[in-house]
Image (cartoon, rainbow, N blue to C red):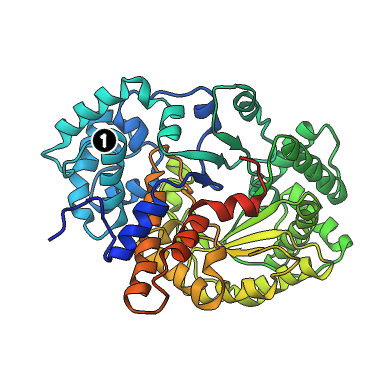
Amino acid sequence: MKKFINDNFLLNTQTAVDLYHKYAKDMPIFDYHCHLNPVDIAENRRYENITKIWLDGDHYKWRALRSNGIDEKYITGDASDYEKFEAWCKTVPYLLGNPLYHWSHLELKRFFDIDVLISEETAGEIWEKANRKLESDEFTVLELIKKSNVRALCTTDDPIDSLKYHKIIRENQKYEVKVLPTFRPDKAMNIDHNGFKAWVTSLGQVSNMPIENYDEFIKALKSRVEFFHEQGCRISDHGIEDIFFEVSSEEEVEKIYQKGLKGEKLTQSDVDKFKTMTLLNLSQIFYKLNWTMQLHIGALRNNNSRMFEKIGADTGFDSINDGIIAKKLSKLLDSMDMNKELPRTILYCLNPRDNDVIATMIGNFQGGGIPGKIQFGSGWWFNDQKDGMEKQMKSLANLGLLRRFVGMVTDSRSFLSYTRHEYFRRVLCNLIGSWVENGEVPNDINLLGSMVEEICYKNAVEYFGIEI
């Protein structure tokens, strides 16, 4: 019987062991999609206790706490930090089979050198040991990033952001990691949301130009893309609940835009026409600047209206959407490609039902001499667990080129989440090792080791063209 979280955790063949320890383990990390706060990096934040660094803002853990019957007071409420921590420790033994059980123990072991099972009985011991560690100089944000062997990371930023903290990071020589912004224009797309007009007003202010019509709206967005580009940004990111595609004229979109500014009721057709034209305009700008565009498809957000009103978005009340994506996604990408202005694109699906759809869709638009120009993104959110990662990689291997895959991202707000890259690398090596064991691929350690190194790090560096 194997020990839990041992050196060969999740590695079930000798080939998997060799691939992980010789090729994957020590590869650097290029975390090209995360939600880390650049303020924390610029200020090299320290954390007062383990609750602040481990539980605050972690909606994965919050969902699990609620499912275990923990009152909201001990999740996002006014309970003390120790009470919240203790509530989490009480919940962990109920997580057997959930990736949070693995991640939580990995985080404690890798960052705090604490190798005990998390439970109500061990809460006090873990609290004291972890908090003593947090007092040391090894537990600033920069040291945590360094310890994780991160060479570059890309945050997620609103187009109206000043990026002043990115500038501070860039100009400070002690920051060895490259921290770059990512252009996330969701608020520009969501014309049917209440805050659209206020956001457009802010866009005009930071762009130093009036925005009275749709053409000026696009010009203002273009100016922000160019500003982000000057600050080192080379990636956009788009959260898309339902894939849209509806052709319209400029005159139609102008009318829809004016209705949106006035807060008038919009039909679904209006919204789809606006989003289609806006994303097509943006994709042309991205292409000309040689950016990569990420489309995160299929989250059904803020399902619990009562809790959304009480504590806001990104608090653990999102789930998987089940919209049909193939035809509209095809038309969207095809419209970008018709004028040879389809940028490098990474497609993520939250519904694993769509794995094969995405894996075949990317093959329709490859080319231009760019290896893996259109990517099937890593198992995302509800899929960044062992089964989800394996399913995503198997679909890509079956229907495309797994070896051109640009690998894992944390998609996280926590500086302890870099253990997810370890988790992914172990799953990758175990998958390849099983193929060797079954005689499905040659037992050529150099060939397979090169593949592992490329997927873990090298492909992303080449794909994004960012000097690290």
Task: Kindly indicate the quadrant of the structure image that contains residue 329.
Answer: bottom right
Pinpoint residue 364: horizontal percent, then vertical percent: 68, 75
| Residue in the picture at 55% in, 26% down | 175
Left or right: 194, with 436 as reference point: right
Is residue 68 at all visible to an observer of this figure?
Answer: yes
| Residue at which label 1 appears | 84
Amino acid type for the residue under numbered disc 1: Lys
Is residue 237 at all visible to an observer of this figure?
Answer: no
Quarter holding the C terminus is top right
Front position in the image: 8 or 63: 8
Secondary structure under the numbered disc 1 in the rendered image: helix
| Residue in the picture at 17% in, 51% down | 93
Quarter holding the N terminus is bottom left
Front position in the image: 231 or 272: 231
Front position in the image: 64 or 145: 145
Left or right: 295, with 367 as reference point: left
| Residue in the picture at 55% in, 52% down | 458
Pinpoint residue 319: horizontal percent, then vertical percent: 44, 60
Front position in the image: 276 or 102: 102
Number of numbered discs present? 1
